[in-house]
Amino acid sequence: MSSIELVGLTSGKHLGDDEAAAICPLLTPSTPIGEHPLADSTPPVLAYDVEREPISINTAVLSTLGPDAAKYIEPGIDVSPPIDIPGGGKRAELGASLQSSDSSSSVLHDTSFLTTHHFMNDANFQENGSVKPSYYTFQLGNGKVPEYGFISWNWPLIRKLWFCGLISSMVACLCTVIMFISVVPTSCDPPKEWYQGSLFYEIFPASFKDTNSDGVGDLRGIRTRIPYLKSLQVKAVRLNSIFAADHYPDFYENVKNFSQVDRSIGTMEDMDTLIGALHAADISIVLDLPLTNLFLRPHELGVSDASPTESSEISNIENIMNFWLDRGVDGFYVKGLEHFTSSPFFVRDVSNWKAVLRYYSTFYRPKIMMCSNTVLTKLMHEYPLEDDRLATVLRSFDLVDVFLNVTEPVGLRAQINGVLRGVTFSRMDYPWVHWNVGNVETSRIATRVEALNASLAALFINLMLPGTPSIFYGDEIGLTNIVDHKKEFLDVHHLHQVPPMHWGNDTSFSGAHDYSWIPKGQALMISRVNTISNILEVRDKTPAMYTRGTVKNHEIFLNCAVDRYSDEYLLTVERTYPRRHSVALITNLREQPQTRDLSSIYFGGYVLGGISHYLDGQYLQFHSLTVFPGEALIVKLDK
């Protein structure tokens, strides 16, 4: 369509005064160019609805519009084409003439900013007779969008890398969670060292097993019986003196060389092999270290690097410990220490021994020292409490050996209570108690007790006490002292408790010849090794049985009671632990059956094991409990 020439009209021709001109919208003062809505500095905007009144048309120019102009010009109608009106659907009209030249020039200047988009016919937006609003926008100017650097990046590769990184991170997180779950302990049982609460097995080497048929047990024989020790749940083997001595084994404590194994039981190579085999089976080894002979004859020690001094008769023990610790030994039972408590160098020497053990403990499992409870008893009775001797022993030793006399239930109960209320249970960092009911220096249990199988019941008492239990070889089968009806072995009466071990029908102590250096003893026909093994397995998993107490606010609380029920026939031992089932032992060491009503103390529970006519797993009520001679049953009590 041809453009239409807009002719400016003077104010004198069409409007009489300024007031009349002021009422015409197109003749009002124009907005300055810099503030006009269509100026270059303003952002893109929508076309606004401007309503104007019709004005006169200059007919002088109609001839120049051509024949098509008539259809656009009608009386009273503006010649401007319809434009798009957003929101209201109205038309904006442009006047064909202006009142004055000033107004005309202003309008012409304003209309120069309009493009053809302002004159689009909105007839195309008619729908059902109504005006359809339009939302077209336009932008003044024709600038080019700058090209940023990230647009040219390799986005497909970047997306792949991000995806792979996301998957890798998720897999790493999953693996981390699985790792943490795998290392989380399945139980919250309190931890313990290998010597705390685990079974020790004491062996007299010359009477355990003979492999060369000379009638004397040897180190190789012990090594061949490691599977038996494993089946018994043994965690540490304690060997009585193995050192070269005059007339070994009759006088095994007359040691003449602490750096050599007596030739009657083997060689140093045999000892090294035994230590390695025990460690491979997760069994520690502890050596008895007799001091009496060393004190009497220090210059005959026989240790190559030993240097006896006049200031300390027992200072050479430090060299002996170094020698055997280098070969893999895990600890020592320092026997006869009670004879040296009066030495002025006692505190210094014991502290030095502990320093040696502490040094070797940094390389492997903790190295330990044991002593007899007699040492503590003597120190408490003969020295004031402020003396350093007692404190040195309590800080330096890891186990204190206590022998239990099980022949009298009343006396046994008093002895146990005395130990539980003694100094070793006053603090958690003091030595653990190493309980035994028989050892190399005492008569056999089976010989001392009344009932036939009471020796096994005594072992269950040992297993139920807080601390570390110990079994002397053969006690698990009821082995007795040697049988010497003709009184032919009175000269070795101190060895009547070390008869050869019975190994059943498959093999004898000394092979086919069945020869031994000392007469045999008797043993029970039925072995209770499996029963003891089962109880020890339960003990290792039950904090109420293997711990020695609980700590609250730095105060120790005992978890063992032996006086819940008391009489001269039955002995009860109860073990407790917070938020766990209590465990009780009821045993009869007499020769007559005993029936009791214990319902006022215990309601009921399940039998865990023992030596009794009750079945394992059977639910037991205590209103009428019968215990036969030599029986011992362990019950997990109801909460």
Image: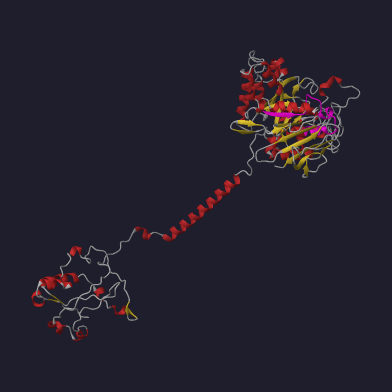
Pick the front one: 285 or 373:
373
Q: Quadrant of the N terminus?
A: bottom left
Q: Position of residue 419 (x, y in %)?
A: 70, 26
Highlighted range, magenta:
430-459
Q: Is residue 410 magenta?
A: no
Q: Is residue 243 visible?
A: yes
Q: Position of residue 557 (x, y in %)?
A: 65, 32
Pick the front one: 535 or 193:
535
Q: Residue at x 32, y 61 (%)?
A: 147
**Picture quarter containing residue 362?**
top right
**Picture quarter containing residue 118?**
bottom left
Q: Is residue 533 above or below residue 247?
A: below
Q: Is residue 90 above or below residue 43?
A: below
Q: Is residue 338 above or below residue 166?
A: above
In the rendered structure, the answer to whether residue 7 lies left or right of residue 299 reads left
Q: Is residue 439 visible?
A: no
Q: Quadrant of the C terminus?
A: top right
Q: Position of residue 586 (x, y in %)?
A: 78, 36
**Picture quarter containing residue 564?**
top right
Which colour style is shown?
secondary structure
Q: Outermost residue toward the bottom?
A: 67
Q: Outermost residue toward the front?
A: 600
Q: Position of residue 114 (x, y in %)?
A: 22, 71
Q: Outermost residue toward the right?
A: 486
Q: Is residue 455 magenta?
A: yes
Q: Outermost residue toward the left?
A: 12
In the rendered structure, the answer to whether residue 58 lies left or right of residue 469 reads left
